[in-house]
Amino acid sequence: MNTATDPQVPPPALDLDEVSVAYGPAVALENIDGMVAPGEAVALIGPNGAGKSTLIKAILGLVPLAGGRITVLGRPPAAARRDVAYVPQADTLDPEFPISVGQVVLMGRYRRIGWLRRAKATDKEAARRALEQVGLADRARHRFGTLSGGQRQRVLLARAIAAEPRLLLLDEPFNGVDAVSEQALLDAIARLKQDGAAVVVSTHDLTLAHLACEEVCLLNRRQYGFGPTNATLTPHRLRATYGGHALELRGDRVIVAHS
Amino acid sequence: MNQILIEPFRFPFMARALAELAILGALAGTVGVLILLRRLAFMTDALTHTVFPGVVIGYLLSGEGGIFWGALIAGAATAVLLTLLTRHRAVTEDAALAVLLTTFFAVGVVLVSRESGYTADLTAFLFGRILTVTPAQLTQTLAVTALVIATMVILRRPLLARSFDPEGARASGYRIGLLDLATNTIVALVVVASVRAVGTVLVIALLIVPAAAARVVSDRLALIVPIAAVIGALAGWAGLAVSYDASIHHGLRLASGGTVVLVLIACHLIALAAGMIRRRPRSVRRAA
């Protein structure tokens, strides 16, 4: 059935159909399968090198697929970029870059503003509101690099919010983030979901997966589970996903040791 | 003061030299900010060397007038080559650039050495001939300036997004390869436009120093760009005036290109001092 042409039934925000990605002869991801509905969040969970970032890049249409198909909002990934926002890890960006927090957030509006036009009042208002949603409205004029790591991550989320995405992709947003910023990120993600956006978050943190996401996808090259968070994050599946890095606690809990 | 800064430019050749240097200084200062943001200083250095054989070949084929076009072809070829080379991570950027740089430069030197007026020509190619700028040359410079500035205005948002966050820019649909080609071409064009006036060696100073000085003085891009342009233009003016005055009134022959660079370096040192004074209170607060 082609849901994309039926105005009554919205297409899933993200549909992964037997997705495989290879870098040359090395297989990075094999047969990933799953669906994310609008307003839902899924956590991508797995060890370093499991292919979480690769899957995010594939959803953005930045790496070619070796097999299968990805459908974003009923369209091929490259055709859906206008409605997709990506939040990179803040510590990958140059803290010396001469750019203000407000300018970073306004970048989320660039595709709407176009090339030559000046930013309209609505664009500036959207950027201001986005910054407010991550609790940093008073920092708009500060230089991006002067903020803490957690605050920079919030600014990048605000940039994504300003783009008014229907699918939001976050790459390890909670890494090295303080408790205040973590809560601000969780709140902002919850609000985006309420507004009908779907969210994909890659994370090591099982607690945060429980807090932010109703679904999880367990990944380590191949898929070790995709489904509701509580039912999927079982000790058995986590051990399978993490191999030797998972330790059992009191029979029913698992902690994951990072190498 | 008037006598040093205004008087010399009553002569038409000095007025043309001033116009050429002021335009080039402002243009190079502006493009320099892009180089600074993209951390392309080394690539720019490589470009100034790879343009050199183009300059020589252009000159050998059709004299003074051929220099611009020879440089343009070499510059365009380098811009494309660099974009392709740096796209594939297999060759690290440094090594690729170093190989390209020395190869092209050696070709230029070998070609020049076959000429009879070897050292005079070499000097002119390396350090430029600012005092013999022709009206036609000035027109070319203006055309390149208009083209480069228009391109930068049109591409300002994609260029900023790509410089700040390449992955994010790619994710939002910008064509990074094309943007990088545009950037390399812009830098190549400025090098080409500057080559006859200030030479392949000194153009690097015009491209790097004003932007670096402006960055020290300000954190805001909206200020860094005009400051860099003004520093570039003023250094051109002051350098030319000082070298003229020293040569005519004090019997001290100062090469104008070199004097311009020294004025630029002085500007940078002043900016560094100003930056240190400006930043001091903040670092004290941070430590507290």
Image: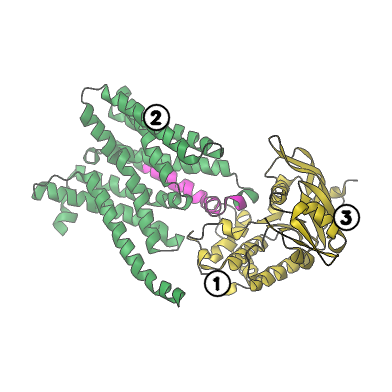
Chain colours: A yellow, B green
Camera-side mark, 1 or 2: 2
**Quadrant in the picture for the C terminus of chain A:** bottom right
Q: What residue type is labelled 3?
A: Val
Q: Which chain carries label 2?
A: B
Q: In which quarter of the image is residue A41?
A: bottom right
Tell me how far mark 1 sits from mark 2, CA to CA.
50 Å
Q: Name the residue under label 2.
A: B103
What is the C-alpha distance between the residues marked 1 and 3? 41 Å
Callout 3 and callout 2 share a chain: no
Magenta span: chief secondary structure: helix
In the drawing, what numbered circle is on residue B92? none
Q: Mark 3 points at which residue?
A: A9
Circles 1 and 2: CB distance less than 8 Å? no
Q: Tell me the crowding category of disc 2: few under 14, some 14 to 19, or many 20 or more residues within 10 angstroms, Cα based.
A: some
Q: Which of B223 and A223 is in front in this view?
A: A223
User: Chain under label 3?
Assistant: A
Same subunit, tags 1 and 3: yes
Callout 1: helix, strand or loop?
A: helix
The nearer-to-camera label among 3 and 2 is 2
Q: Nearer the viewer, residue B275 or B235?
A: B275
Residue B147 belongs to the span the image colors magenta: yes
Decide if residue B63 is on the left or right side of residue A107: left
Magenta residues?
A: B142-168
**Residue drawn at (40%, 34%), measured in percent from left and top?**
B101
Residue type at mark 1?
Arg
Residue B194: give x, y in percent of width and height: 33, 41
Q: Where is residue B205 in the image (x, y as percent from the top left)?
A: 32, 47
Badge number at residue A139 = 1
Which residue is at 86% across, 54% downward? Answer: A7
Q: Is mark 2 on a helix, strand or loop?
A: helix
Residue A12 visible in this rendered orientation of the protein: no
